[in-house]
Amino acid sequence: MAVDILIAEDEPSILEALDFVLQRAGWSIASVMDGEAVIDAVRRMQPRILVLDIMLPKRSGFEVLKQIRGDQSTRDLPVLVLTAKGQQQDRRVAEELGADVFVTKPYANAEVVDTVRRMIGNPASRNTS
């Protein structure tokens, strides 16, 4: 089951808001709420992009990102790191681990939609091969 966007976020209100705005923009969405579930979900669903929170239960987003970039089958997956941890240190670590884009909470919904659109294109331009 391929989806456009996999969201890894443990805060229900943020997850619900992201799900809503990204679906409204036309993408198909799936979500997981802990770091251990992310890798399996990425392999199973083959999303076009991963929206990854850093502070996740069971395994941090940093650990998840390191594993994704270290695996041949997932290393090219675009990753948008979305986190309340906005300090320069966190941004630097995320970039060193291979995050494509870093957005700090609180964020504007339009900022996330525009960022996803820049990263993977419009929903109507899906590659259906």
Image (cartoon, rainbow, N blue to C red):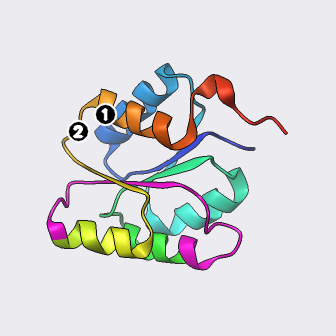
Q: Can residue 30 be seen here?
A: no
Residue plotted at (42% across, 63% down): 99
Q: Position of residue 117 (x, y in %)?
A: 49, 34
Query: Can you name the residue that lies furthest to the right here?
Result: 129
Crowd around label 2: few <14 · some 14–19 · many ≥20 (10 Å): few
On screen, residue 2 versus residue 12, left or right, reads: right
- What distance separates the C-alpha of mark 2 from that of mark 1? 7 Å
Q: Mark 2: which amino acid?
A: Tyr
Q: Can residue 50 be seen here?
A: yes
Task: Tell me the quarter of the image containing the C terminus.
Answer: top right
Q: Magenta stretch: give its range.
A: 68-88
Q: Mark 1: which amino acid?
A: Glu
In the rendered structure, find residue 64 and report the number of the disc placed on it. Answer: none
Q: Position of residue 4 (x, y in %)?
A: 61, 39
Residue bearing mark 2: 107
User: Residue 119 versus residue 17: which sits nearer the camera?
Assistant: 119
On screen, residue 97 versus residue 92, left or right, reads: right
Residue bearing mark 1: 111
